[in-house]
Amino acid sequence: MTPKNDSADARTITNPPALHDPAPFGYSHAVSAPGELVFIGGQYASDETGAPVPGDFAAQVEVAFARLRSALAGVGLGFEHVVRLGTFVVDHDLAKLETLGKALHAHFGDRLPAQTLSGVASLALPGMLFEVDAVAVRQA
């Protein structure tokens, strides 16, 4: 696939034909953009004190992405500026991959960032099932 870009989004997404199509899994192989890098620390399903909120995996994914949106907005950015995600899934399995893929498509459409998913035994606090961090680009 040739690089994909449009005037409203300065990110260039490239999924080389020598590699599998990553879109069904919720990511792109390579994303580049000119500008200043902004790093967003891990976001998870938390309340206003930082305590994890109860909920199943899908509910925690949605809250974590809402927190990510808020962190991005805090620096004047949105999901359209994200070039890379790191996702951390407790007790990863294919059902969770499908849930995460649907959430990624819901938030990013077909302009999926590069992503690495790490299956982990646990996260920082008891009850956390999912965490996401991001690298975004502020346009020059």
Image (cartoon, helix red, strand yellow):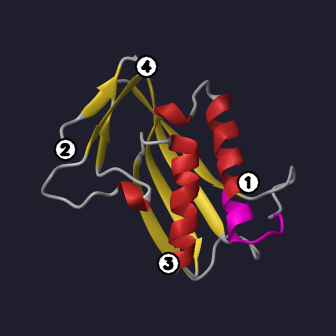
In this figure, which residue is indicated by the disc labeled 4? 8
Tell me where residue 63 sits by quadrant: bottom right
Task: Give, as a three-letter code, the residue at label 4.
Answer: Ala
Q: Report the Cα–Cα distance between label 1 and label 2.
A: 33 Å
Tell me where residue 91 sits by quadrant: bottom right
Q: Report the Cα–Cα distance between label 3 and label 1.
A: 21 Å
Helix or strand or loop: what does disc 2 sit on? loop
> Would residue 133 be visible to someone looking at this image?
no
Q: Report the Cα–Cα distance between label 4 and label 2.
A: 20 Å
Q: Nearer the viewer, mark 3 or mark 1?
A: 3
Task: Give, as a three-letter code, the residue at label 2.
Answer: Met
Mark 4 near mark 3, Cβ–Cβ under 8 Å? no
Task: Give, as a three-letter code, the residue at label 1.
Answer: Val
Name which of mark 1 and mark 2 comes first in the sequence.
Answer: 2
Q: Residue at x 57, y 73 (%)?
A: 96
In this figure, which residue is indicated by the disc labeled 1? 63
Residue 91: in magenta span: no
Q: Where residue 137 sits: x, y (%)?
A: 44, 31
For the N terminus, the quadrant is top left
Instruction: Please give the range of residues in magenta.
Output: 53-61
In this figure, which residue is indicated by the disc labeled 3? 94
Q: Residue at x 33, y 30 (%)?
A: 33
Q: Residues within 10 Å of mark 1 (few under 14, many from 20)?
A: many
Name which of mark 4 and mark 2 comes first in the sequence.
Answer: 2
Task: Give, as a three-letter code, the residue at label 3.
Answer: Leu
